[in-house]
Image: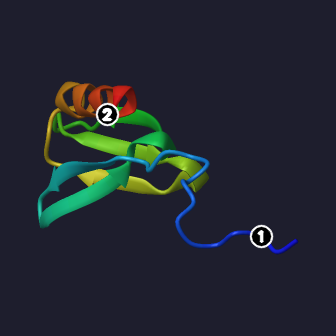
Amino acid sequence: MRPRCGGQKARHPVTSLVEVKSLGGTNYVRSDRVIAIQTSPTGTAVIVMEGGTTVNSSEMPKIIAERLLAAARG
């Protein structure tokens, strides 16, 4: 029997992308890949992703955390 290809529902729901403002524009991060949000000395945020990638943001960490929580809830 051949496996069905088109028209099947995904086994995992689509992951939400969260918009994060940076000094140079806008970044989008996957909410399910964020490990931590750190506060930098200037009060802005450094987002730590799986694999050790960091994303700098010009926003306050609390604002980003609230957006990530909302995305995780759906």
To which quarter of the image does residue 38 belong?
top left
Q: Nearer the viewer, mark 1 or mark 2?
A: 1
State the scheme by which the image is colored. Answer: rainbow
> Residue tagged by mark 2?
68
List x then y, in percent, for residue 8: 57, 60
72 lies left or right of 65: right
Residue plotted at (57% across, 46% down)? 12
Residue that mark 1 sits on: 3
Decide if residue 13 is on the left or right side of residue 51: left
Vertical relation: 69 (above or below) 22: above
Q: Which mark is residue 64?
A: none
C-alpha separation, residue under disc 1 versus residue under disc 2: 36 Å
Residue at x-position 28% and y-position 28% = 70
| 57 lies left or right of 46 | left
Which one is in front, 49 or 41?
Answer: 49
Q: Secondary structure at mark 2?
A: helix
Q: Are marks 1 and 2 in contact (CB under 8 Å)?
A: no
Front-lying residue, 12 or 32: 12
- Residue 74 vs residue 64, the one in the foreground: 74
Rendered position, 9 above or below 60? below
Q: Amino acid at mark 1?
A: Pro
- Amino acid beneath label 2: Leu
- Residue 51 percent across, percent down from the top left: 60, 54
